Amino acid sequence: MERINKTLSRLPRWTALRSRFDKLKQEVLEHPDIQAFIRDNEGIVTGKMVEANLMKLYEYISQTKNCADCPDLPHCTNMMEGYEPSLAIKGQMIEVHYKPCMKKRLYEERRKTERLIKSFYVPKEILQASFADFSLDSPGRIDAFEYAEKFAAEFDPKKKMKGLFLYGNFGVGKSYLLGAIANHLAEKGVSSLIVYVPEFFREMKQSLGDQTLNAKLELAKNARILMLDDIGAESMSSWTRDEILGSILQYRMHEHLPTFFSSNFDFQSLEHHLTYSQRGEEEKMKAKRIMERIKYLSMPIKLDGPNRRHM
């Protein structure tokens, strides 16, 4: 009696299937990621294992890794949106495991922030800000741009790095530049938190009643990059200055966490603003203490130029 394999090999359909299988195997084995996987597991991965798990390996090479060629999360082409594959060996089986990709992790971090701090929401043009659209029509703007671009390019959580204290008139692009820094960092997988200070302080007061104050405070304290937008525009009370702002800045100063600020005030004017509470109390030493922390954390640069909101 003829062996079954020999008989099947004469059938056209079986021959076509075998040909497709061989092409698939060749495509898998020639893929650099699979070759690296086999090298890394030399002596463990056998030819028999590869054949038995060929479809798993093909699934792996058909997915993108490290968000390559992926413009954004909604356009993810992977089998599981926002997840990238990795290979693992279990006994004689090769398994494909999925973990959240960089863009998925950033999305989840931002979602968490949005749920916790309503004042995270900033104007749409700030969220879409880029260095390419930042005008360089004055020395101060050039200095700020160069520092911001250098910071975003060279950011390293292991290094002690100062943020910026951007000050100037309304509409000159202070908040926009903060947004451009945040977006550039996000492209590198570095999360940041932009907080509109007046709304944030209002929300912190309201949080005394719903017991979420500590969670929101910890989020601001521990943000990898914190940007306090429009500091000085708020109605300052002793409590928000000392217990909220002071607590955040003290923690970030000790932990060497980069912190950025934007304000209509320069250092001297901001110190004057921080000196007087809503009740008219004059507290110079407490204001000086806050300013020392701000100066430690950031470098002041004045942005000038016309009000771009009216252009």
Image (cartoon, rainbow, N blue to C red):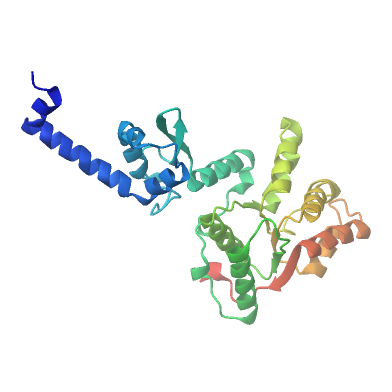
In this rendering, the answer to whether 295 lies above or below 218 is below
The mark tally for this picture is 0
In this rendering, the answer to whether 148 lies above or below 280 is below
Residue name at image x 82 percent, y 59 percent? 293
* Residue 69 placement (x, y as % from top left): 38, 54
Residue name at image x 74 percent, y 31 percent? 211
Residue 236 visible to the viewer: no
Q: For the view shown, which residue lies furthest in the front direction?
A: 1
| Residue 197 vs residue 106, the one in the foreground | 106
In this rendering, the answer to whether 213 lies above or below 279 is above
Residue 10: name its quadrant. top left
* Residue 66 placement (x, y as % from top left): 46, 50
Q: Is residue 234 left or right of residue 187?
A: right
Q: Is residue 270 left or right of residue 230?
A: right
Q: Is residue 194 left or right of residue 65?
A: right
* Residue 282 placement (x, y as % from top left): 92, 57
| Residue 27 vs residue 61, the one in the foreground | 27
Q: For the view shown, which residue lies furthest in the top direction?
A: 1
| Residue 139 vs residue 278, the one in the foreground | 139
Q: Is residue 265 left or right of residue 91?
A: right
* Residue 265 placement (x, y as % from top left): 74, 67
Residue 182 visible to the viewer: yes
Residue name at image x 51 percent, y 47 percent? 102
- Check the picture and name the quadrant holding the N terminus: top left
In this rendering, the answer to whether 140 lies above or below 54 is below
Residue name at image x 64 percent, y 42 percent? 117
